Amino acid sequence: MKNTVLKILLIALLGWAAQYLSVWFAGPLTALLINLFWKGSSGQGFLSGFLGIGLLWLALALYTDQATDGLLTVKMAQIFPLNGSRVALISLTAFVGAFTAGMCGWTGALLRSVRD
Amino acid sequence: MKLIKLILVSSLTVALLYLFNRVMVVNNNALPPLGKILDPVNGFWANAEKDIPRLKKAIRSDKLKGEVTVKYDERWVPHIFTTDTRDAYFVQGYVTAAHRLWQMEFQTHAASGRLSEILYHSLGDKVLKNDRFMRRNGLLRSAQATVEAFESDPEANMIVTAYTEGVNAYIESLSYKDYPVEYKLLDYKPEKWSKLKCALLLKYMAHMLTGESEDVALSNQVNRFGMDFVNLFYPDFPSDLSDPIIPAGTVYEKDPGIAAKTDTLSTDTSMQVSASMSPFEKLPEGLGSNNWAVAGSKTATGAPILCNDPHLQLNFPSIWFEMQITTPDYNVYGVTLPGAPAVIIGFNDYISWGVTNGTREVKDWYKVQFNDTRTEYLVDGVWEKAIIQKDTFYLRGEKEPFIDEIIHTRFGTVVFDQGMKDDNSSDNLVCRWIAEEVSNEMFTFVKLNRARNYEDYANALKHFNCPAQNFVFASKTGDIAIWQQGGLYPFEKGQGRFVQDGSLSQNLWTEKINPDYTPHIKNPERGFVSSANQHPTDAAYPYYYNGRFEYFRNRRINAELTRLSNISIKDMMTLQNDNYNLIAAEALPVILPYLNEKAKKSEYTALLNTWNFFNDAGQEAPSVFQAWWDQVMEMMFEELKESEKEYIIPQQYNVIRAMKTHPDHVIYDDVRTPKKENLSDMINLAFVNATAELDSVKAVKGNLQWANYKETSVQHLLFTLKPFSRFNIPIGGGKSIVNACADRWGPSWRMVVSLEKETKAYGVYPGGQSGNPGSRFYDNMINTWAAGEYYELWVMKSENDEKGKVLFSQMFFN
């Protein structure tokens, strides 16, 4: 349990840095790499990626939305189209990050177990 | 087992990453790359701005000579302070790009027929057709010629080079994260800016202002309805009307450099134009621009006041970008066109100037006779070789580009033929557009920015060729002036009114009239100059021109300027926002008496009977008049639209006059019914239809208030991005009203400049300084504009003159 939490935190932190320095999928790929080097079950691999990047994207989107009073969020939530719902767009953002990173984490864990 | 699982999961992961990284086209809708755009670090979230736009505080470039300071005020207007003129253009380019990059590039893509490169995957052949039309119209070719004109002049070249370097310095500093949100939504990248793009931007403006030409339509209508019909509804000079820009009765000199014509010109009006010619797209009638200047003798302060409000399509990002540029040589404030150097409309420490469209036709159509393979065409009985050019269009999402074959003749380029817009036409209509000539319109603005007196203004205008513009002028020394400048040719009477015979070389234009002899006037007796797209002159002007001129606004403006004395800035603001509907005031007395007894008792008629003819936002009568009048126009000219030929609806002034002078004309008959309708039948039927329409509008919207009925909107350049637009803006006015605010067009910049010792200037435009929909400066001026209010235009005396109004400072240095 403690391991999983630490892994999630590590993925979130390194994923954040990776995305700042590079492109969007650098975050999810961090989940792959961490699970490649830090052995764990397939389930833990998926969960750590899903929550690590999912929570990171959720927090960042939520922060931006709040800090800007949702000025752009509302407009984008109509374009997407999510009926102008800020909550829906923030959730979609978190889910896209989470799911991609979850799959990456799972792949990382599997790669590790195949190598072992 | 493990391996199979790994292969399965990893392929799924790769597929997911791939999908989320690219555009997906579903049912012709292009979905943006989900992962890329939703990334809260680099995606659209990075475009959401907290208080002020995110800009770099310090910019270093080896292209700069000295230091430049830029101060952004409370409305985010940049005030540029530089010690070097070249640096000023560099920084103008940089600062403009930092706020309007997407718009600048999108418009140049549109102008050069390259929108297919970014939109073909979702819009398909529709966008390709548009691109082909733009190329055949010659925008790209004329922009290329303009670049040569820039490069042949050291100063012009310095200016566009510096501006281009400034834009590129900004573009080079960007990564995906910094791209305007439209790039992220459409998933493409900005390309390098170039001198060609500066030229394209200017040509795009020329295209917007000269899109229409009557030649083809009038030729068709002469053939269908006869010359009497054309002369009644499309007269060159309406006999009962004379309120030209240069006051009637002015005596004109002929240009001594133009030899008297000896040739008899072929103005054969029976030129047959193919029956299958599809109608062109129509621009809304009654929109243009207003400008005027009143002399000190008529103002309260004794100093001249200059006003201008150009009416353009109401778009986001805004068409204008406001700024102040201060160099040791000049200090200019006004609005710029994103993508072009210099201030276009504004004032400096000595003078102020503004523009309206000349509306004189600058496109001439010729019917050219080709051989079967279209490799040669006949001129004066001799076959000449046509220049055939392959034109390539790259299509997004397609491997193979589209190749168009463009045929050039010495009369112009084939625009409409069986391959373009009109698949059945056997005709080859070529268009000659004055904007295709080599010219350097930019110089006019560069020189106006630095002008100090009337002579400087007159010299600056000489560079202006297309489209003809009415340049209004006022100076602190008390001069006022107006000049319609643009390429003008010594046409014979009637030449260029219809499609011309392209087999005779004498129908080509040759010499041009010296700008000293184009219509202008300085300090007229009446104490003001003005223009609102009407005739530049009365019929006494020695050279023939044609176009669509009567928009009612000029007569209202001139009546008000004549009436007013002791004029204040407030009076001028009131006049710019004047909602008096002169069409209604002239049309209603003609059509109301025809109403039958039943219609006379209608609640709608009651509204009209008590109406003061003002199209104010909250009034209901303007909606009633508009609904009725639209029906009248529709029923009167339904036969024009019955044919598949290109047609043009007469101007409303000529329609009202015809109703008075020709109440028995056959035009009032509805050709779609067996009954023979007369004028009275038509007017009553129109009223019945209008009543039905008004009833249903009222049922939906709850009332008939003019602003609700008219529905003014300011829309994003990509119409599909509705959430980036503003709809139902509460504003009065309308077509052919001084406050020319229609549904999609209107006053794009209102400016009032009082040239007192210390200049007092006011302005507003429907939008905001930032092109970013995630910025509060994107649309912050809309409500002020709609309310008819203004901002005081703050001319900073020096970079240290902050008055607590500076929100952000930027430094540029080498």
Image (cartoon, coloured by chain):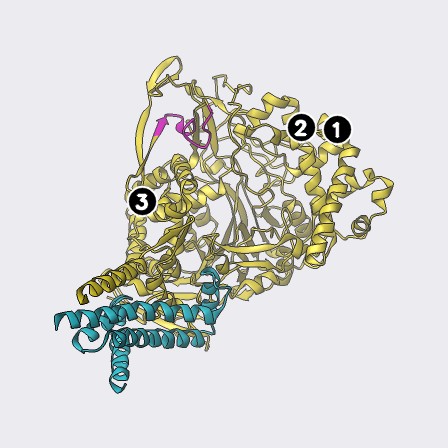
The question of residue B417 being in magenta is answered with yes
Q: Amino acid at mark 3?
A: Phe
Gap between marks 1 and 3, in whole Å? 54 Å
**Mark 3 vs mark 2: in front:** 2
Specify start and end residues of the magenta stretch as a single range: B406-425
The chain holding disc 1 is: B
Which chain is represented by cyan in the image? A
Kindly indicate whether the residue at mark 2 contacts the one at mark 3 (C-beta within 8 angstroms): no
Q: Residue at x 25, y 84 (%)?
A: A6
Instruction: Locate residue B185: give its quadrant.
Output: bottom left
What kind of element bears circle 2?
helix
Residue placed at 32% from the left, 51% from the top?
A: B160
Mark drawn on residue B150: 3
Residue that numbered label 2 is attached to: B232
**Among numbered discs 2 and 1, the one appearing first in the sequence:** 2
Q: Which type of secondary structure does the marked residue at label 3 adopt? A: helix
Q: Residue at x 21, y 75 (%)?
A: A35
> Is residue B495 one of those drawn in magenta?
no
User: Decide: marks 2, 1 in contact (CB < 8 A)?
Assistant: yes
Q: Quadrant of residue B317?
A: bottom left
Quarter of the image for the N terminus of chain A: give it: bottom left
Which residue does the numbered mark 1 point to in the structure image? B662
